[in-house]
Amino acid sequence: MASRPECAACQRPQATCICGYVTPTPHACEVLILQHPLEQHHAKNSARLLHLSLPGSRLVVGEAFDDAAIHALMPEPRYTVLLYPPTAIEGHAAPAPLDAMQLSNPSTVRLVVLDATWRKSRKMLHLSPALQRLPRLTLDDVPQGRYAIRKAHKPGQLSTLEATCAALAQLDGDAVRWQPLLAAFDRFVAWQQTFMPKRPLALVE
């Protein structure tokens, strides 16, 4: 069976190419996206759109990242933080304390983002002690989620794209810069909804 033609830029089938939603947005902070393999070809995944919209960002697929792999991914010296809740996980190394002073200059900061479901992100951390030890960056003000095509299991859970935009806005103090990308994300979500089966109307007794 012949494979479907694939877009060289977004690496999706041409029929579902997302390049029309890519919104290049300059940013000072370096962004490294570590994507779980199960998300790589997920049609509703937002990480590819995020990566294509962030010039110079990197997207690496994998589940486990040992110390050598992490070192290879971070050759330049920057203050590296992991975008993840501060909740302690049994059996994991305690993260380093966050140094707020080092966050004051985004151009010297590296933001690491895990692109996975919450359960899979915990597995990625479990398999990657080097990630466990990174200081955690958390969002001061969690925005309302707009990712209607995937289920959030708890309030405040955002897509990878939304969470990263919120983190970068927090670091550089400029939320307005990210509105065009978030608006494009809204259009992406609405487009994905057109592929979802319509639920039958409930019968009224």
Image (cartoon, rainbow, N blue to C red):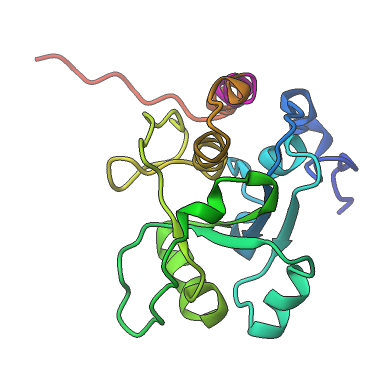
User: Residue 6 appears at what percent x and percent y?
Assistant: 86, 43
**Residue 63: quarter of image:** bottom right
Question: Which residue is drawn at the image coordinates 75% and 69% (left, top)?
Answer: 73
Left/right placement of residue 1 relative to residue 70 reads right
User: Residue 28 appears at what percent x and percent y?
Assistant: 71, 41
- Rendered position, 9 above or below 85: above
Residue stretch rendered in magenta on the structure? 180-187
Q: Nearer the viewer, residue 136 or 77?
A: 77
- Rendered position, 61 above or below 3: below
- Rendered position, 28 above or below 182: below
- Rendered position, 37 above or below 57: below
Left/right placement of residue 80 relative to residue 51 reads left
Question: Which residue is drawn at the image coordinates 37% and 26% (left, top)?
Answer: 199
Q: Quadrant of the N terminus?
A: bottom right
Q: Is residue 104 visible?
A: yes
Q: Nearer the viewer, residue 146 or 87?
A: 87
Left/right placement of residue 11 relative to residue 92 reads right
State yes or no: residue 15 in magenta: no
Q: Nearer the viewer, residue 202 or 44?
A: 44
Q: Quadrant of the C terminus?
A: top left
Q: Is residue 31 visible?
A: no
Name of the residue lying farthest toward the top: 204
Q: Main secondary structure of the magenta part?
A: helix
